[in-house]
Amino acid sequence: MPKVKANNITMNYDQQGTGETLILLPFLTADHACYAFQVAEYAKHFTCISLDLRGTGETDKPAGVYSTELFADDVAAFMQAAGIQKAHISGLSLGAATGMWLAAKHPDKVRSLSLHSGWPKTDPFLKTVIEGFQIMATALGNVPKMTIRAIFPWCLTPELYAAKPDYIESLSDFVLSRPAQPLAAFKQQSNAVIAHDVEAQLGRITAPTQITFGRHDRATFTRFADQMKGSIRDSELLIFEGCAHAPIYEKVEEFNQKTLQFLLRQTGGGTA
């Protein structure tokens, strides 16, 4: 796996495909491989760079306070070190929170912005949910096992659990197969989620933006969708029916098709 020194850390990434650069930013606890179901399609049209954020995967996990703004600065430094002048930016959840900061602080680096299951500022409800994840991770002493037992039920619908138990098991096996995030790094990263606040910066985002949510997402969606759509000037809102916080796993084909359509419109490449 290639690595780049950026912002005083070594960042790990995966690269596939050809075309304009598309940078994929992972969600809480995840490394670059979380977009395995998307990269195969995206890479037919784009040079896909999937990152390990600070504190995850094979990227460095230094001590100190993490923030979504810091993650965005890491990505900007990564782009400069890798010789990427401008890129399409896509992220889900924590990846979307990071993408908002990146587009607000470094607008010259962002060709388009894809915000999936994002939120502008952590509210008391979301703070309580994340604190619950921290408590369970500490009790189990194992972040991947906490992800399966605590985060999965927030990200996937009860209907998916009932209809496709083998699929849920395969997703669980996938999580367990990846490099385990250390407990200390999870606490630093999840504290960044709790402290996230990019609300005042949304008006600085100038890139064409796609905002998506799952209809049944309890963590984000309804209380944030209108605010994000109203505050990001060149934005469009898309709702995935029958999904919770992770449409990338619940409606893979539909998610890939509709997000790729948006991305291709930003390149003049037509539709997928």
Image (cartoon, rainbow, N blue to C red):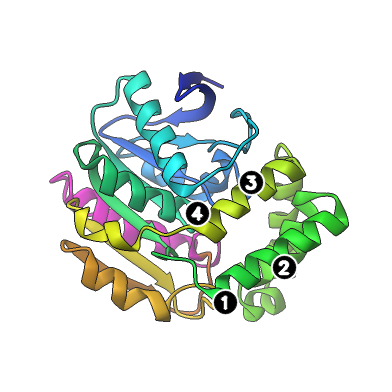
Callout 4, which amino acid? Leu
Q: Are marks 3 and 4 in contact (CB under 8 Å)?
A: no
- Give how far apart the Cα atoms at labels 1 and 2 are: 11 Å
Q: Taken as a whole, is the magenta stretch helix, strand or loop?
A: helix
Q: Are marks 1 and 3 in contact (CB under 8 Å)?
A: no
- For label 4, the residue is 94
Residue 128 on the magenta span: no
Q: Which residue position is annotated with label 1?
A: 125
Say what amino acid the circle numbered 1 marks: Phe
Using the rendered image of the protein, determine whether residue 28 is visible from the camera's viewpoint. no
Q: Secondary structure at mark 1?
A: helix
Q: Is residue 230 left or right of residue 159?
A: left
**x and y percent of residue 246 in the render?**
53, 64
Using a 10 Å C-alpha cutoff, classify the residue at mark 2 as few (fewer than 14 neighbours), some (14 to 19) or many (20 or more).
Answer: some
Q: Of discs 1 and 4, which sits in the foreground? A: 1
Q: Of the two numbered discs 2 and 3 on the same chain, state the one appearing first in sequence.
A: 2
Residue 141 percent coordinates (x, y): 85, 50
From the image, which quarter does the N terminus lie in? top right
Residue at the limit of the structure toward the left, as seen here: 268
Q: Secondary structure at mark 2?
A: helix
Mark 2–mark 3 Cα distance, whole angstroms, equals: 15 Å
The answer to whether residue 262 is magenta is: yes
Residue 132, label in figure = 2
Mark 4 Cα shell of 10 Å, populated few (<14), some (14-19), many (≥20): many
Secondary structure state at the residue bearing disc 3: helix
- Residue range in magenta is 247-272
